[in-house]
Each structure stands twice: as structure tokens, then as C-alpha cells.
Amino acid sequence: MPRSRLSAKAGLLIIDMINEYRFDDADKLFPAIEQTAAHIADLKREMKARSLPVVYVNDNFGKWQSDFRKLVTRCLHEQCRGKAITQILLPDEDDYFVLKPKHSGFYATPLDLLLRYLHVERVIITGVAGDNCVLFTAADAYMREFEVTVPSDCVISIDTDANRSALNHMRVALKAEIDPSVALLTRLAA
């Protein structure tokens, strides 16, 4: 693929960033996750300016009666650790959302159908955790023959070495582009 432009219609996936961050070791993500969220927000603005779809893909946290809008409301509560992240990445009315029961955004969800409906050929995968949900979603996207981009500054994991290793694995095994978001923004603007 030429580095000057994107060859396929892209869709942005934001994985698990709308989150209360009440899991073990979540504190290790802060404050770095706020910078990650800022990079994702910049990318989201550019995608929206190009009328490209944005899909929030979130865990249902074992709550089978979950509702994404209620999760956003909970995360905006004053006492929520994820409030600042949610404010940075606040979903717009025309954004899409998918709740997932496991690590991959594709497993037991309508994500594949939604992306095909939106004519997406390249998924730009961002979010938390790079060595877990982002990695599994990227692998499933690759197996479904989507082109995969994972901007290195738009994913974060509790362990920075594990994050770096996961990015390298996605680059090699999944043929994913892992350039920082500024390079992707330049190509989107071309």
C-alpha cells in the first residue's frame, strides 16, 4: 500500500476506552492513558471530517443487560476513574457501538456485519489493552480479510513491554501498520 494515502475505506474502532477502570492494576494506565485518549480523539475528529465511521467496541463486563449509553453516563459520574477519558472520547450521536462479551470485538457480536454494511475495508484499531482486546480484535479482523492499522500511540496496556511486543506481533503476523497516529492523520488528509 502506498504510504501517501489509504487504499481502502477505513473505519475507526475504539476498544474499551469508555470504562470505569475498576479492574486490577488499572491505576498503572494513568496518567498515560489520557495522552492515548487525546491521540484517539484527534484521529476520531479526522475520521468524522472525512465521513468515515467510528465504532465504540466495549466489554459488557458480564452484565448481559448492558446498555452503552448507560455505561457512558456511569463513566461521566464525578467519582468514576474513567471520567476524564470518557470526556475526551465522548461518543457522538452518529457513532456506532458494539458490546462484546469477550476479548475480541468480533466474537459473538455484530461487528463484522456492521463493518460490511458500512463498506469498511480497513479497520483502524485503537484502545485498551494492546496486548489483549486490541490484539484479539486485530487478529479476528485479519482473519476476516480486513486491512489492519493499529496506530502505536493509540493503544495502551498495563505493561508497556507487553504492549510493544503485541504491536510488533500485529505488524509481523497480521501485516498491520503500526505507525503513530500523526502518520495516519497525514495519509487521511492526503
Image (spheres, grey):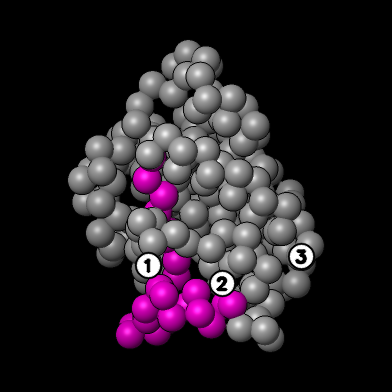
Q: Is residue 180 above or below residue 13?
A: above
Crowding at dot 3, Cα within 10 Å, few <14 / some 14-19 / many 20+, comes out as: some
Q: Secondary structure at mark 1?
A: strand
Question: Which residue is painted at 49% across and 54% down in the image?
Answer: 14
Disc 2 from disc 1: Cα separation: 13 Å
In the rendered image, residue 64 lying in the magenta stretch gets the answer: yes
Q: Position of residue 67 (x, y in %)?
A: 37, 78
The type of residue carrying mark 1 is: Lys
**Residue that label 1 marks:** 100
- Distance, label 1 to label 3, CA atoms, is 24 Å
Quick check: 169 above or below 135?
above
| Residue under pointer 2 | 19
Q: How many marks?
A: 3
**Residue 87 sits in quarter:** bottom right
Front in this rendered view, residue 81 or 64: 81
User: Which residues, given as a range, are shown in magenta?
Assistant: 52-76
Tell me the number on the disc at residue 30. 3
**Taking 77 as reference, is 50 left or right?**
left
Q: Residue at x 57, y 77 (%)?
A: 75
